[in-house]
Amino acid sequence: MIIKVEDIYFKYPSGGTVLNGISFEIKKGECVALLGVNGAGKSTLLKCINAILSPYKGVVYINGEGISSWGRRRIAQHIAYVPQRSQDSDLTVFEMIALGRKPYIDWALSEEDYQIIDDVITSLGLQNFTLKRVSELSGGEFQKVMIGRALAQTPDVFLMDEPTNHLDIKNQLDVMRTIRKITKSRIPSVATIVCLHDINLALRFADRLLFLKDGLIWSIVTPEELDPKIVFNVYGVPVSIVKSKGYNVVVPVDEEHYNEERNYPAHTLRSHYFRGTGPRP
Amino acid sequence: MAFFYFERGSLGVQDNGLLDKRSSSLRFKRYVRSKRRLILLLCFLGSLVILVSLSVGAYRIPYGELIEALLGMSSGKQAILVWNIRLPRTVASLVVGAGLALAGLTLQSLLRNPLASPSTLGISQGAAFGAAVSVVVFKLKYLSITIFAFGGSFLATIIILFLGKLKRLTPESIILSGVALSSLFSAATVLIQYIANETELATIVFWTFGDVSRSNWQEIGVTAFAVFIALGFVYFRSWDFMAIESGEESAKGLGVSVERLRWQGMALVAIVSSVATAFHGVIAFVGLIAPHAARRLFGSNYSLLVPATSLLGALLLLGADTAGRAIIGSGGLPVGVITSFMGAPLFLYLLMRGYRR
């Protein structure tokens, strides 16, 4: 076990409970995708884990130690957080990655810091961008820089908030592949939680899928165990799951064909999805 | 010591021969060194401007005599002129310019707003209002005026912070609330001017002109002390400010206590701008122009940006003051007028270019 989230409750001051008791555990070298509709509390959960937001109840443990008594700096030495894209800074790529050393430095980089930054840049293949400003990078390159910054933090846990937003399919795959490879091959190993909108990316790159609904964990499944019912219950969209080249792929199904899909009971459809739409064949 | 993260090639980066072979950190260090040389060049330019500013004025001092006077080798009229009139003015320009520029940089970073500066957010106007209140209502003099000016600017700062934080305003709305605050404080100052007697009115009007010619060494000393503290603070917290550059949540994720830094920084800004305003009046736009110019030249690396911004601010104000004296002769134009004339077009330019932060 590397990270354990126990009974997290969170409420925004403006009202509305967002998280209603979330508990799960993630092991070293495991990549978990966090899924759910917009506003389900995925980003909120990441920020609660990272103590950017403070939950009113619940504890996060890292390597068995509760982090609620830790300072911001110490948390940052163990958890690296990549927020949703905000690519509007004049920093150079080197400086941006060097920021990952922030939890360890006071006001100047040491030789060891330089060494680590060098290693990160080389292992992500970013050498040609070292002195370019991050605002001039393409979306995919920028996301890699942000991953590099997280790597430079030498953390135990990676939190990534929708790293594939606004990226084309090649860059989406590229970024997810990098994240997965880091999770699997970094020494010492790391646990990754990544927020995603695309279930198929999650099926392909995550070890487990964690679905959030109504502030609760609806289900935690491996890609092989994913059931159309879960997707329907979480997103309200009828889907079928097909196998392609060894991967499960989620395909949304037209409403008219819902009878042909016998994967979920018809009463669920009537009570939720087709409510008020008139008689059905 | 090598720091290995991955088994070789495990991230699947293929070196197709196009990747830069040189060490990234060596290249970065070289880049920083070249920027440092640029700062040195600015210092050199600055010393030339200082010489010009000491020489230009109603009575023009030839450079040879100027240097003799500076080195204490002459004791005639020129020496008195240089030491008692020209030098305080020059040093005041440098110190106030550096302080306002630094305050602008800090505000722009902490509020994540490229249009923030003591004058655009109404902080300077708040100081002027506080000063007016102390002169007319409480009949105070000297240091007490500064304390009131500080109170006024602190009030403005707190209102801005409150609006920005609790109401989650966008950058545009923060600037608009700054406009509202400025006109509120200006109106209140006018009201106080209306009920003031002639001497008090003269004192207050004197305030609203930003002018560096009236300072004595003590006032300069106090301002320099405040600026020095602020400079040290921002410089030693360079990495915290850089982290904020990459977004507030990002910064928190990197271990920066953003709220605490914001309060400390804003308090320092309030101190620096109120001391500057209390002794030298409202000098607009230096706090806006200098950080932007420095950012253009040096990027967002605060260990370069902080010295560069203060240096550019100092040179800008000194240049403006010297230009004022060179054009008008005698006492010259109040420098606040010149900076406002220079600043307004820049403000428009920034708006048109579209701000990113």
Image: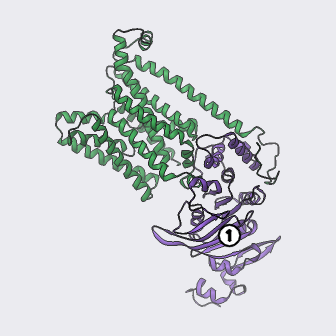
Q: Going 52% across and 37% down the picture, which residue do you hit?
A: B306
Chain A rendering hue: purple
In the rendered image, the vertical position of residue A200 relative to residue A232, given as above or below = above
In the rendered image, the vertical position of residue B305 relative to residue A24, given as above or below = above
Q: Going 67% across and 35% down the picture, which residue do you hit?
A: B29
Q: Quadrant of the C terminus of chain A?
A: bottom right
Q: Going 40% across and 28% down the picture, which residue do you hit?
A: B93
Q: Quadrant of the N terminus of chain A?
A: bottom right
Amino acid, disc 1: Glu
Q: Quadrant of residue B53?
A: top left
Q: How is the image coloured?
A: by chain
In the rendered image, is residue B286 in sight?
A: no
| Residue placed most toward the observer, B274 or A7 | A7
- x%, y% of residue A118? 72, 43
**Would you call the spot at circle 1 few (<14 residues within 10 Å), some (14-19), or many (20 or more)?**
few
Q: Quadrant of residue B296?
A: top right
In the rendered image, the vertical position of residue A168 relative to residue B104, given as above or below = below
- x%, y% of residue B69? 41, 12
Chain B rendering hue: green
Left of B31 or right of it: where is A278?
left
Left of A9 or right of it: where is A153?
right
Which chain is mark 1 on?
Answer: A
The residue that disc 1 covers is A25
In the rendered image, is residue A56 in sight?
A: yes
- x%, y% of residue A23? 62, 72
| Residue placed most toward the observer, B11 or A266 | B11
- x%, y% of residue B133? 24, 43
Left of B189 or right of it: where is A262?
right
**What is the total number of numbered labels drawn onto the structure image?**
1
In the rendered image, the vertical position of residue A220 relative to residue B120, given as above or below = below
Query: SS of the residue at dot 1?
Result: strand
